[in-house]
Amino acid sequence: MGSLDSYLPIFVLFVLGVAFAALSLVASRLLAPKRPTYAKEAPYESGIIPTHELPQRFPVRFYLVAMIFVIFDIEVIFLFPWAVVYDQLGRFGLIEIIVFAAAVFFSFIYLIANGALDWGPVKRVRPVSAPTSRTSSSTVRRVSGSDGEAA
Amino acid sequence: MIPTSFAAAISDPLFAKGFGLAVLITILVKVVVAFAVLMVSVMLMIWFERKVISDMQNRIGPNRAGPFGLLQTLADGTKLFFKEDLLPERADRLVFRLAPYFSVIPAFLIFTVVPVGGVVTIAGHVVELQVADPPIGILVVLALSSLAVYGTMLAGWSSGSKYPLLGSVRASAQMISYEAVLGLTVVVVVLEAHGLSTRAIVDSQASAFWHWNVIRLGVIPFVLFFIASTAELNRPPFDLSEGESELGGGYHTEYSSIRFALFFLAEFMNTVTMSAVVVTLFFGGPDGPGFHVVRWLWPILWFAGKTVVFCYIQVWIRAALPRLRYDQLMDLGWKRLIPLALAWLLIVAGFVWSLAWGFAIIGGCIVAGLMLAQSMKVARLRRDELSLAGERGEGGDVVPALGSAERVGG
């Protein structure tokens, strides 16, 4: 253990996987027909002929998520060696990780409070201005006269 | 010392020289068996999923090819070989061709580090029933599941089409978000196992079911890991990357023929493998009562049985739960699962040291949770203020929130 010999099987399976995928593609090329037309090669838009160019930009939130992810992924990477030797570190290890987690957590709180991880449309908080004369009895139309009967 | 090992690494990058023939044969047999098992299990998994979902929806499901429709997957796969392989004209040709490899190869490799059985002795050689046992086993799982993001991302980006691009951007944001949860819960397991190798993790849970991590660590890490792995696989209810009702087919919309089959294969292979990883991390892997008759067989049966149970649960979840909305998905991942995973890690670390520390940390985590709730409230108030200001046509005096800059005044 410890040397690279335990990785050899992974490498062999990697080669096997590449070979499998490549052979499948070769087989498909030999067996499948090749009759491309304009309609087949056009971008799929549920049957509509695309009029606009492909959007080059997408919402900035995706970039934000990627950046925030880096913070947490680095945190996780630092946690692994700590977790392996936690028994030997003793109380020092515990206090250390609390300080570390607190530092990450406060930056996380800052991000949340700034709305960095808010998705979806901004909620409309328009005041409701329904006419006061409108009640349930004025809205629900009774087909027959009596109340107990369902329409 | 360094030059010689460097020279050795150049001439023999995998340090295979010191191997005897027996070791080499063992490795080859293991790899071929693993490959065959993976292919067959994927075939059965697809059939199983279709059949179980049919049952749950009161349909019959595939029943034509082979007994009980078992060979349906094989028939579908063969059919795909004969289908026209289209390359969209706006696609980035090289990346479009490469993306299926990025997707399918990590799927093959994750299974290598999963221990499927105990240790057996064949003709004097001790053989672990596990394809490879690298000392950083569980990190290999995390690394390869991160690599799978590339397949999804590049497939959608290179297609040169609207829906695949949207699907892949969604999928990569989702996968990296839940990867943090995945990592944090694995740290809890490592804390208890004192090692990163999957064999060490399994050994630390051996001998009785109350030693299994699912019980020993509290149920929370298991639940978090299972949710996160479902999201990582883009399986329902987290399948926003291929939401049929809004994105066509998601990131693989433009793929046809065998290239599509490779994505499909990767998806189901990952489902099986992730079930196996859950079993390894939290349910003792091949651990379970055995008998003296054929002693090597029982662990394998236990492992296979537990894995099938988790495959079934994945299918069940797919049949039972509706798809999440994207903001719900991100809120669940970032604002609930990640803080909870971090808190649980600290709590377990505290209880490992002493009871008093554990309760002190629980108190600290409750305070932190209140702070988190307060910060979410601040964000919400800020958003409301923004939208009101936008309706009044001002908006200049309010600092725009980080994430919602493009919505100001809209």
Image (cartoon, grey):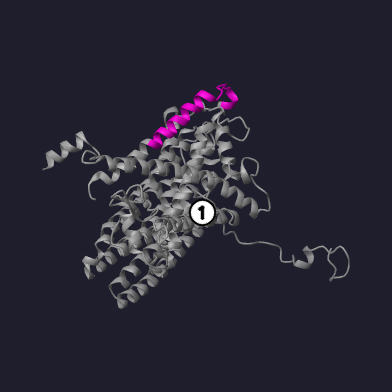
Does residue B338 appear in the picture of this structure?
A: yes
Q: Chain of mark 1?
A: B
Identify the residue shown where x is 39% and y is 36%: A16
**In the figure, is residue B342 to the left or right of B385?**
left
Q: Relative to B257, does residue B18 appear above or below in the rendering?
A: below
| Residue under pointer 1 | B311
Q: Position of residue B398 (x, y in %)?
A: 44, 56
* Magenta-drawn segment: A16-40
Does residue A54 appear in the picture of this structure?
A: no
Identify the residue shown where x is 58% and y is 56%: B321
Q: Position of residue B331 (x, y in %)?
A: 48, 57
Label 1 crowd bin: few (<14), some (14–19), many (20+), radius 10 Å: many
**In the figure, is residue B290 to the left or right of A9?**
right
Residue type, mark 1 in image:
Cys
Q: Nearer the viewer, residue B133 or B155?
A: B133
Q: Nearer the viewer, residue B32 or B169?
A: B32
In the picture as drawn, the residue positioned furthest to the bottom comes out as B356
Q: Secondary structure at mark 1?
A: helix
**In the figure, is residue B119 to the left or right of B283?**
left
Q: Position of residue B263 (x, y in %)?
A: 49, 39
Q: Nearer the viewer, residue B318 or B127?
A: B127
Q: Nearer the viewer, residue B249 or B400?
A: B249
Q: Relative to B268, does residue A104 appear above or below in the rendering?
A: below
Q: Position of residue B87 (x, y in %)?
A: 51, 27
Q: Is residue A33 magenta?
A: yes
In the picture as drawn, the residue positioned furthest to the left comes out as B1
Q: Main secondary structure of the magenta part?
A: helix
Identify the residue shown where x is 47% and y is 45%: B269
What is the quadrant of the N terminus of chain B in the image?
top left
Q: Is residue B13 magenta?
A: no
Asked which quadrant contains residue B186, the reply is: bottom left
